[in-house]
Amino acid sequence: MEPCRPRLLAALVLLLVMPLAPLLALPAVAEDFRLSDQCPPGFEQLGGDVCRLATLYDQYGSLRGRGVGGTRTGLPPRRDGFTAQQIDLGRYLFFDPLLSADGSLSCASCHDPALGFADGRGRSTGLHGEALPRGAPTLWNSAFLQHFFWDARADSLEAQLTGPLYAPEEMGNNPADLLAALRGNDAYPVLFRAAFGDDSGPIDTAQVYAALAAFEASLVSLNSRYDRYAHGDHSALDAEEIAGLNVFRSFVARCAECHTPPLFTNQQVAVIGSPEPPGLARDIGAEATLGSPKLRGAFKVPTLRNIARTAPYMHSGRFETLDEVVTFYNGGRGHAVPEGEALQLHWHIVSPDLADHELEQLVAFLGTLTDERFLPRVPTQVPSGLAVGGRSAREAPTPTGDAP
Ligand code: HEC
Ligand code: HEC
């Protein structure tokens, strides 16, 4: 629940210290924080307080045997089963810059709900303003993913998030300082007990990771106009968009082989030969993760859900618009790979030779994958009293150089 009582005194103090605000962490009032006992929209509360996603896709069978591109295919296994309180605690943690070493960055700094849970940048900006090697992917539907990061190097939400938390150039924290900050806060110990039980002991890292994973797993986007069409409402898409869907799943364009509905990813890595931004060396991608030279330049096939909200595109933001992306795919197999560089392109990367109007139809179709109905509420304040969300990507300093 949000804090609701206006506190005159607090407001007065706030006015007085306003000029100092950037220097001071204003203590939030502990009693103002309560965890919601309601599951997020789209989830049902079952016995034992656990929230379970309810989606029409559960009426369909598994992917196997249906061919790719089929609209009535089920979803892969998902992370759910968290309680309403755990999810809501994760929401506070996600927006609280207390999680970073200097109190400036929260997860939302680079995964901003107003920017499709990405940050609108080709490459994200780290703690000290340096450009990170890659861009921030959306977090929508991460409950269904088996591998995380562009190079697929983490296998769970919990394993993933220790990356940004403790990387010196990202949030720069360490487990001991993180726990000390949370345990020393007025509100968090109470909130963690509300989420994990009275006997859960002092806050530990497993609880922090579980709450953040619970919140991430609640970010579900499966109610786009495309989905209404998939479930049988043919009026949900117009003729241009339906034509685009047909191009998308055709044997000519082959998009659906990799961006397989309903998640619009087959969760594999693939070498497609997308170019790096000018001046940047080739990012070897999943070669590093899997130790296979064949996978030099391979990246995880990203979901295309809410793709119209998350420009620029590709692992380092090489393309500003979806027009540029479809033009790239139509440019001929390997056309953007610098001469002399031997990348082993995936066999579904073809030279489809689509006409201009078909490229427009593809882009129109990609626009039907937008659904932000279950956008979570951004807290009005976070327990640390620091700025909600921390430094936003929009106000991040101009990158000063490359992170190691
Ligand atoms: C400084 C910016 C920044 C911050 C802060 C940040 N991230 Fe990220 N996040 C990124 C970037 C960049 C990537 C991709 C990195 C890569 O693939 O090597 C990423 C990747 C991810 C992924 C993988 C998504 C996928 O589809 O593979 C998840 C999940 C994620 N972040 C969650 C979080 C959480 C939770 C937090 C807070 C604990 C957080 N991030 C903080 C920039 C950030
Ligand atoms: C062989 C598998 C494969 C095929 C076929 C494929 N893609 Fe991709 N797609 C990928 C991979 C891998 C990436 C990420 C590459 C990178 O970051 O450099 C990607 C990235 C994208 C992106 C950018 C996503 C983001 O979040 O930045 C879009 C949009 C896209 N593809 C659309 C399409 C369309 C449209 C087609 C058909 C014309 C298509 N893809 C065919 C594998 C594929």
Image (cartoon, helix red, strand yellow):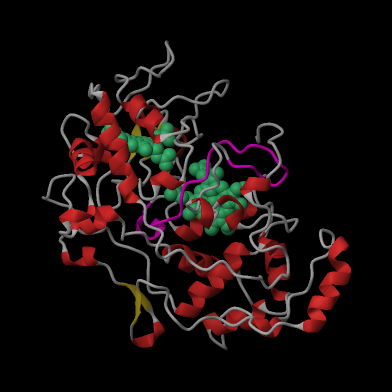
Q: Position of residue 27 (x, y in %)?
A: 78, 74
Q: Position of residue 319 (x, y in %)?
A: 46, 31
Q: Is residue 387 left or right of residue 245?
A: right
Q: Is residue 71 left or right of residue 25?
A: left
Q: Is residue 169 left or right of residue 198?
A: right
Q: Residue visible at 42% across and 29% down? A: 297
**Whether residue 286 is situated above or below residue 161 in the rendered picture:** above
Q: Position of residue 337 (x, y in %)?
A: 40, 18
The C terminus, quarter of image: top right
Task: Identify the residue at the far top of this view.
Answer: 340
Res. 73 in view? no
Q: Main secondary structure of the magenta part?
A: loop
Q: In what quadrant does ligand 2 lie?
A: top left
Please tell me whether residue 138 belongs to the stretch shown in magenta. yes
Instruction: Write down the region rendered in magenta.
Output: 124-146
Q: Residue visible at 29% across and 71% down? A: 54
Task: Identify the residue at the far left of this view.
Answer: 65
Res. 125 in view? yes
**Whether residue 212 is situated above or below residue 276 in the rendered picture:** below
